[in-house]
């Protein structure tokens, strides 16, 4: 059976698309692909897959430091591995500190907005997404089922990753949740939404979600609704007609040829 070091070296070599013999303690991991939130989680998954346990990987500069974090041994330069605690969002599977009532009503008093963008290339290549540690750790079975049904699953995984990160940016109440405790769901209408999980199950997050992706990148925007600020009911038709008449009295007379495209489209 191969050692944790050999397994870790093989997995890093696969990610960097080089031979394992090319991986040395000085092999740099201070690369753009590992600096994003997804890249940091990929290193987490690599360590967990190679050694069977989690380790903090933030700020790792090279393979020697990664190996030291993974095995608990001193780094090649003789310094002990950093004893950085893992954020709760990286270690918890179900966060019991947020009860179903809190999650069901989660949301700030005012509207919150979060945006996240990710390179599709950051998502690991896999022949079996159902068995890959990165995907099974950070995505729900429903999300994996949807993505693997697409011709190219990785852009769809990247878009869902962005939505989870955007929700966390929209309100600090969601920061303690692991990414596996947030999932993107598709409604019968074709629109998408977000759900968060507690010990009692999944609950709809009070959020509007928009996803988009190309072959190279994915983006998501999440806007939290404001429960304390209900949307006013629409004005009755009669009131709308009066308002339109009143506004027409103050509209300056503009020759049709000089009116904007919107006015011409409206037949004005």
Image (cartoon, grey):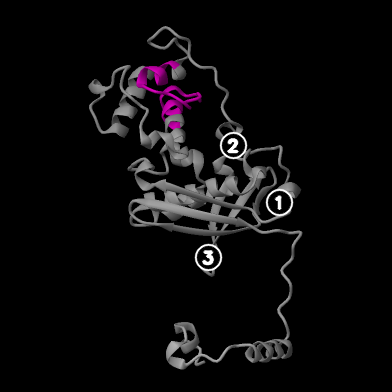
SS of the residue under disc 1: loop
Q: Nearer the viewer, residue 34 or 133?
A: 34
Q: Residue at x 73, y 91 (%)?
A: 238
- Above or below — where is 254 with respect to 71? below
Alpha carbon of mark 1 to alpha carbon of mark 3: how far? 23 Å
- Above or below — where is 61 with respect to 218? above
Task: Look at the numbered discs 2 and 1 and tell me whether their residues touch, using CB distance below 8 Å.
Answer: no
Residue 166 screen position, x and y as percent: 54, 49
Residue 93: mark in rendering: 2
Residue 40: mark in rendering: none
Residue 110 visible, this angle = yes
Residue 35 screen position, x and y as percent: 42, 34
Depth-wise, is mark 1 or mark 3 nearer the camera? 1
Q: Nearer the viewer, residue 182 or 118?
A: 118
- Above or below — where is 213 with respect to 19? below
SS of the residue under disc 2: loop
Residue range highlighted in magenta: 45-68
SS of the residue under disc 3: loop
Residue holding disc 1: 108
């Amino acid at each position: 059976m191969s050692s944790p070091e050999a397994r870790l070296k093989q997995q890093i070599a696969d990610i960097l698309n080089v031979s394992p013999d090319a991986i040395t303690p000085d092999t740099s991991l201070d690369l753009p692909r590992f600096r994003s939130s997804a890249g940091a989680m990929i290193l987490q998954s690599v360590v967990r897959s190679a050694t069977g346990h989690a380790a903090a990987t933030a700020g790792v500069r090279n393979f020697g430091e990664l190996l030291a974090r993974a095995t608990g041994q001193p780094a090649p330069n003789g310094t002990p591995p950093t004893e950085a605690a893992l954020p709760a969002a990286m270690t918890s599977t179900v966060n019991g500190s947020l009860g179903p009532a809190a999650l069901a009503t989660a949301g700030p008093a005012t509207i919150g907005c979060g945006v996240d963008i990710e390179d599709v290339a950051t998502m690991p290549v896999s022949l079996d997404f159902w068995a890959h540690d990165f995907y099974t750790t950070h995505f729900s079975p429903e999300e994996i089922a949807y993505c693997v049904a697409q011709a190219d699953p990785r852009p769809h995984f990247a878009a869902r990753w962005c939505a989870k990160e955007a929700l966390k940016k929209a309100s600090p109440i969601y920061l303690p949740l692991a990414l596996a405790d947030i999932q993107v769901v598709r409604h019968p209408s074709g629109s998408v939404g977000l759900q968060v999980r507690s010990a009692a199950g999944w609950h709809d997050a009070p959020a509007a979600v928009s996803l988009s992706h190309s072959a190279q990148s994915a983006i998501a925007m999440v806007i939290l609704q404001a429960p304390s600020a209900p949307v006013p009911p629409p004005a009755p038709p009669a009131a709308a007609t009066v308002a339109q008449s009143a506004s027409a009295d103050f509209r300056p007379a503009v020759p049709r040829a000089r009116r904007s495209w919107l006015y011409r489209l409206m037949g004005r």
